[in-house]
């Protein structure tokens, strides 16, 4: 049993405490998202027409880009641990305030569910960026490739717990107020863990230079443009954002159309299946990346997305679209995420935050906006001219196939320019003679 646990968690002596503390913080975020995900999506779709969620996604991403612009000003300037603590407190406060909208009789339920949905989606994009920048600062690239998959498993564990609570709510009807307050409590506990455990971590001091938002964003973008592999990776993330959006809408629309009132129960079970699948794939992601090499691992997600879009095009129905979207989501959140984080760990510390912002936030968000508006325009035109649902569905799936081909092209270019990019003066691996254990200052009581 002990040997199996060692294989499952390839941690060396003294690494467990820090890794599990980071894992719990990640667990808290995804548990909170899982709790409200099913309720918010089901509640929103019950209040509005299906395709209007595409406009909400577009607006949501615009808000996220604006928020990320502010975030980019502080991510490389403030101490990472304090920044992480501040984010945890902000989410705790927001989840504590939102129940007031449901308690107010004059506040429409449709808007309340929309706010919960927007917060849930912002949390999905915003929190991981701050968290993984912190993790990249703590671990050197070699250690990160071994430890990051272990930490990432806590995200899937949190998702399972959160979705499980959401599924139980479908039967016992705890209600949004109690669930939101539970989320606030979870974030508060994560904040306390961060204060107790991460304060022992020693990191490179933050940058003191005061720059404007424009200068901050320009520096990050200039770095990406001058390193070919990162430039093509950026193109791939833009395309991936559009494809994943079209796949998700197609799955939600088909399930809502085919199942009707059974949508919430199906959606809860569907997300649980994705979470379990993600745990399995994440457990082998490090071995997959090591076996095929980092530069080739960027080809996996585009091939999966292309196959998913083609499957949806030729095989109609909610089961096909759900499986296709689920497989793409699992791959995106496991192997592809681990590969991107290992790649970004090579960026110098003073620029890593801004580069990560572009690749993990700005570009996928922009891709979501493009995919949402394209799909909405196609559906709106189809409804206006009286086309059957099956006809305009094939049109936006065809557009998705074309965009997936762009993502595949970008991945091949990342592989082709990888060695050249490693020689760039901008892309210097951090030289750290000490182990990550040397960054921990344990007191006498811990010895």
Image (cartoon, rainbow, N blue to C red):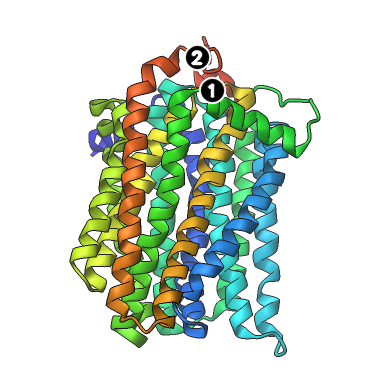
Q: State the image coordinates of residue 201 (x, y, percent, origin top left).
A: 61, 28
- Looking at the picture, does residue 261 appear above or below residue 319? below
Q: State the separation of the CA atoms marked 2 and 1.
A: 8 Å
Question: Considering the image in quadrants, where does the N terminus appear?
Answer: top left
Q: Which mark is residue 226?
A: 1
Secondary structure beneath dot 2 equals loop
Q: Which mark is residue 110?
A: none
- Looking at the picture, does residue 387 appear above or below residue 200? below
Marks 2 and 1 in Cβ contact (< 8 Å): yes
* Residue 202 visible (yes or no): no
Q: State the image coordinates of residue 110 (x, y, percent, origin top left).
A: 59, 82
Of 316 and 101, which appears nearest the observer?
A: 316
- Looking at the picture, does residue 445 appear above or below residue 388? above
Looking at the rendered structure, the number of numbered marks drawn on it comes to 2
Q: State the image coordinates of residue 15 (x, y, percent, origin top left).
A: 46, 28
Q: Which mark is residue 424?
A: 2
68 sits left or right of 341 in the view: right
């Amino acid at each position: 049993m002990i040997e199996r646990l060692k294989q499952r968690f390839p941690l060396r002596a003294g690494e467990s405490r820090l890794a599990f503390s980071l894992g719990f913080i990640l667990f808290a975020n995804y548990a909170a998202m899982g709790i409200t995900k099913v309720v918010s999506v089901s509640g929103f779709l019950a209040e509005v027409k299906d395709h209007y969620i595409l406009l909400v996604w577009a607006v949501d991403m615009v808000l996220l880009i604006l928020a990320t612009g502010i975030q980019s000003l502080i991510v490389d300037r403030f101490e990472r641990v304090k920044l992480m603590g501040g984010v945890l407190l902000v989410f705790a406060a927001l989840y504590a305030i939102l129940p007031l909208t449901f308690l107010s009789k004059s506040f429409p339920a449709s808007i309340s569910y929309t706010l919960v949905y927007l917060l849930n989606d912002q949390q999905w994009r915003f929190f991981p960026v701050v968290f993984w920048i912190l993790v990249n600062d703590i671990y050197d690239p070699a250690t990160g490739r071994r430890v990051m998959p272990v930490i990432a498993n806590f995200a899937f564990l949190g998702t399972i717990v959160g979705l499980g609570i959401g599924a139980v709510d479908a039967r016992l009807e705890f209600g949004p107020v109690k669930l939101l307050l539970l989320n606030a409590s979870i974030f508060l506990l994560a904040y306390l863990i961060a204060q107790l455990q991460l304060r022992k971590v020693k990191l490179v001091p933050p940058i003191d230079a005061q720059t404007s938002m424009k200068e901050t964003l320009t520096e990050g973008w200039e770095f990406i443009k001058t390193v070919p592999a990162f430039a093509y990776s950026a193109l791939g993330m833009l395309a991936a954002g559009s494809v994943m959006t079209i796949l998700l809408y197609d799955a939600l629309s088909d399930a809502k159309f085919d199942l009707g009132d059974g949508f919430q129960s199906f959606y809860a079970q569907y997300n649980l299946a994705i979470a379990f699948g993600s745990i399995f794939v994440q457990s082998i992601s490090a071995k997959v990346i090591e076996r095929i090499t980092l530069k080739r691992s960027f080809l996996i997600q585009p091939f999966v997305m292309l196959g998913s879009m083609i499957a949806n095009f030729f095989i109609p129905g909610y089961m096909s679209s759900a499986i296709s979207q689920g497989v793409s989501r699992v791959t995106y959140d496991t192997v592809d995420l681990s590969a991107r984080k290992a790649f970004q760990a090579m960026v110098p510390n003073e620029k890593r935050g801004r580069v990560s912002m572009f690749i993990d936030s700005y570009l996928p968000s922009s891709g979501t906006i493009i995919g949402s508006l394209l799909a909405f325009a196609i559906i709106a035109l189809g409804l206006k001219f009286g086309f059957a649902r099956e006809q305009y569905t094939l049109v936006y799936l065809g557009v998705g196939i074309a965009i997936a081909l762009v993502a595949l092209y970008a991945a091949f270019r990342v592989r082709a320019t990888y060695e050249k990019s490693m020689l760039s003066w901008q892309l210097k691996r951090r030289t750290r003679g000490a182990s990550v254990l040397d960054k921990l200052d344990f007191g006498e009581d811990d010895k």
